[in-house]
Amino acid sequence: MDHISQQFDADLGAIKGHVLSMGGLVERQIVDALHAIIEADSQRAEEVLAREREVNRMEVSVDDEATRILVKRQPAASDLRTVLALIKTVRDLERVGDEAKKIAKLALKLTEEGPSPRGYHELRHIGAEVVAMLHVALDAMTRLDVEAALGVVRRDKDVDREYKSATRELVTYMMEDPRSISRVMNIMWALRSLERIGDHARNIAEYVFYMAKGKDLRHEGLESIESAVRSWS
Amino acid sequence: MDHISQQFDADLGAIKGHVLSMGGLVERQIVDALHAIIEADSQRAEEVLAREREVNRMEVSVDDEATRILVKRQPAASDLRTVLALIKTVRDLERVGDEAKKIAKLALKLTEEGPSPRGYHELRHIGAEVVAMLHVALDAMTRLDVEAALGVVRRDKDVDREYKSATRELVTYMMEDPRSISRVMNIMWALRSLERIGDHARNIAEYVFYMAKGKDLRHEGLESIESAVRSWS
């Protein structure tokens, strides 16, 4: 029995490691896609597109590993929750990779159409924010740190607010300079992708509550999540 | 043993039923949200927003059921695949519900800002298309019909193409009539939500391949999916 549970822990540890590697790769995809769009670096954009396959491959491979561990070890309760949360996490990470790919494609369009006259201030700011959120969420998952996960949920609120205000400003800008519309729209779509990435980071943070405490807080408001986390400490 | 497997089939049948009910509710959410935006019907939009809780509740409840069946029955191979695919399906359905909510909110904005001068032709058309795709995907899941699932993957390609062309036309329209930008942007966001719903329908169709044949074709191109389906028939 002890031997079996040691083996299970080793297998689970390996899967967690692969999820984190995938997280690292996906973070890099966002960073590079943002660099490509801000610096009009089409070379870098192509690299992001080329690495997308690797992200997809990792999703399928972690998914396989997790299914195998369910068949072989039939884990109960908290171990099962962990495996299910990891399966969901890679799905979110794959979608983050997808958004990075979209941003890289927008970078290629912008290198053709010429740079956005509006600059990239919002992209830079919100981009840094969501990359940090994703990093913290994955780190919280490793350490089952519910306080850190709560921090990610809070930051997602800020990102949503900043995204809305950036969108409003870009609409105003387009109205004043209609010839820029098509280029500014590319920034708009890139911001939308970043806002989604923030949502995925929040999802991952919410799986941490589920892994650590067995609580599904996905559709709870911030206040009730805060009071749940307080009750655990 | 026979009794246990009968019990498992009954439990699994119940979960499938709940997934389909959730699918039905989510379809209605899209239809109503589109009606709200096209007919400037804020009452209907509010109904969609109110029902969003129900969608979320269903996701959590199916997820719980599926986790319980894994703990209690420890299914192997194809049964396990089915349970995992159902867990993923409700996640996609919940996100479709989220997109419907976004469209309903855009409907409320449009009733304030005045209707889109551009009309709703594209919304109507692409909306009908993705609702049908979602319906076929869930139906294919019930009958493990890989041909029907392939049809959904093909239609998603068409939707992506139509979405791109609609977006281009709307950009042109905004350039010609900059005062309409903010209202036309609402149509743009609603189209984006529909395009996402098409992606989720495609995801669900891809789970059908996995449930029926144990094949993960999520990141394959259309051609290799077609040749896999041909090889099964």
Image (cartoon, coloured by chain):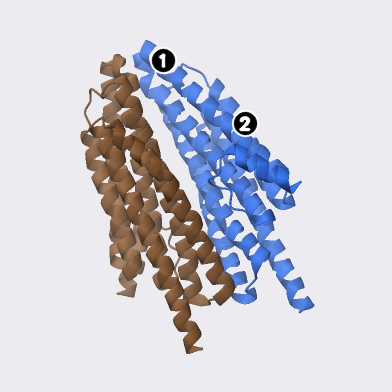
Chain colours: A brown, B blue
N-terminal label among 2 and 1: 2
Q: Quadrant of the N terminus of chain B?
A: bottom right
Return the residue at label 1: B172
Residue B201 is labelled as none
Residue type, mark 1 in image: Thr
> Up-down: is B42 above or below A99?
above
> Up-down: is B118 above or below A105?
above
Given the image, what chain letter belongs to the residue carrying mark 1? B
* A13 on left or right of B119: left
Q: Is residue B18 visible?
A: yes
* A105 on left or right of B220: left
SS category of the residue bearing label 1:
helix
SS category of the residue bearing label 2:
helix
Return the residue at label 2: B128
Q: Residue furthest top?
A: B176
Given the image, what chain letter belongs to the residue carrying mark 2? B
> Up-down: is A9 above or below B179?
below
Horizontal and vertical percent position of residue A27: 32, 50
